[in-house]
Amino acid sequence: MSRRTMALWAPDWPAIAAATERDLPPDTPIAVLAANRVVACSLPARRAGIRRGMRKRQAQSNCPELVVIPDDPDRDGRLFAPIVTAVTAILPSTEVLRPGLVAAPSSGMRYFGSEENLAAAVVEAVADVGAEVQIGIADEMFTAVLAARRECLVAPGGDAEFLAGLPIRELGVEPSLGGDSRTELVDLLWRLGLRTLGAFASLAAADVGARFDADAVVAHRQASGKPGRAPSAVPPPPELTVVYPCDPPVERIDAAAFLARRLAAQLHERLTAATVSCTRLAVHARTERGQENSRIWCCALPLTPEATADRVRWQLEGWLTEGATGAGEGPDSPIVELVLEPVEVSTGMGLQYEFAGGGEAPDGPRADRIRRALVRVQGLLGADAVMVPVRSGGRGPAEQITLVPVGESAVPARPLGAP
């Protein structure tokens, strides 16, 4: 039997989580904002003309009764935990792509008789915790996610046919699958006259590789319904796993948040020493009485220490909150052991980024990898061995640049306005 993947999508999850936290009625128009732009909105808000990317002033002008709530990934992850728990009870190998979207292999679930019965069982299990989701099943994860957005099951071997008629903008709808970096690619393909995924897939792979970057080649494979990158057949070395006995045991959310940062730092020290990056991470929490809460987190880009700490905190906060509120099956006793286990790692050869260009923010994942590389070289060669240029005042090129060691304040030798 060919491999099959189920995707479970909770539409407008940031808006739903915000409404749940504030106990707002379901007919309230809600917009979640980040950097003064709408990143998610509820169905009543969309009916009033609110769209993603819209500025706050324009959104409030279109809908005066709009409730504006700041973006909070911690809230989204914490409130999504009960849904993941319900899905994991049926599909143990669940991967959290982001709060609001999970995926799991659905092959071999013969107990349910058919994929339709399996999807119905998952929807019912999630409904029991008070949430509504859409299910999609296909051969590949990318296809399954798009199928979940349309709430349909793609027949085995039918990925390419299903994708062919979808608009080209679908390449960029899901950030967890690389969509957040494809705005320029989608715009360029549109200007070239490629309106559908099928039109893009009809291009020769060699031509796509010669004209576009590596991510466009991945997008071309996804649009063609071809198999994605399989997990490494060789498991990561066990010495990368971080095992932390909690002394004293963890019972409070603030203690869980502190440990999340500490363990994330330890894990990434080991990853850096082994010159690998983690793209799939399993987090296990065990209690005094032997109860275990496990979750696999998946990310399109290598996890940073901050992203790792966020995912550990979301999982622990969600579990502890379930026990405190009685909304689900929380821990039966204090947490005495935490384990961070890399499930899939990649070497540096598979994660090459450009050192400049791409229009990325200064705090983006590429810039973070550059900083880590510089700090590592500095640790090997000395503090003054790695310098970064800072623009300063002066008459000639030699005077207009001040070299400062990495990590120190970027203070120029002369005022920038000096002649």
Image: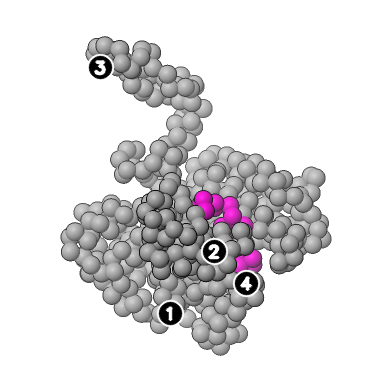
Name of the residue lying farthest toward the front: 64
The crowd level at tag 4 (other Cα within 10 Å; few <14, some 14-19, many 20+) is: few
Residue linked to disc 2:
16
- C-alpha separation, residue under disc 1 versus residue under disc 3: 62 Å
Q: Residue at x 40, y 38 (%)?
A: 362
- What amino acid is at disc 2? Ile
The x and y percentages for residue 141 are 44, 68
- What amino acid is at disc 1? Cys
Q: Secondary structure at mark 1?
A: loop
Q: Secondary structure at mark 2?
A: helix
Q: Nearer the viewer, mark 1 or mark 4?
A: 4
Displayed quadrant of residue 147: bottom left
- What amino acid is at disc 3? Pro
- C-alpha separation, residue under disc 2 versus residue under disc 3: 55 Å
Q: CB of mark 3 within 8 Å of CB of mark 4?
A: no
Mark 1 or 3, nearer chain start: 1
Name of the residue lying farthest toward the left: 192
Residue linked to disc 4:
130
The x and y percentages for residue 10 are 51, 68
Left or right for 258, reference 344: right
Q: Nearer the viewer, mark 2 or mark 1?
A: 2
Q: Residue at x 41, y 51 (%)?
A: 56
Residue linked to disc 3:
397
Displayed quadrant of residue 53: bottom left
- Residue 317 in magenta? no
- C-alpha separation, residue under disc 2 versus residue under disc 1: 22 Å
Question: In the drawing, what numbered circle is on residue 152?
Answer: 1
Which range of residues does the magenta coloring cover? 69-85
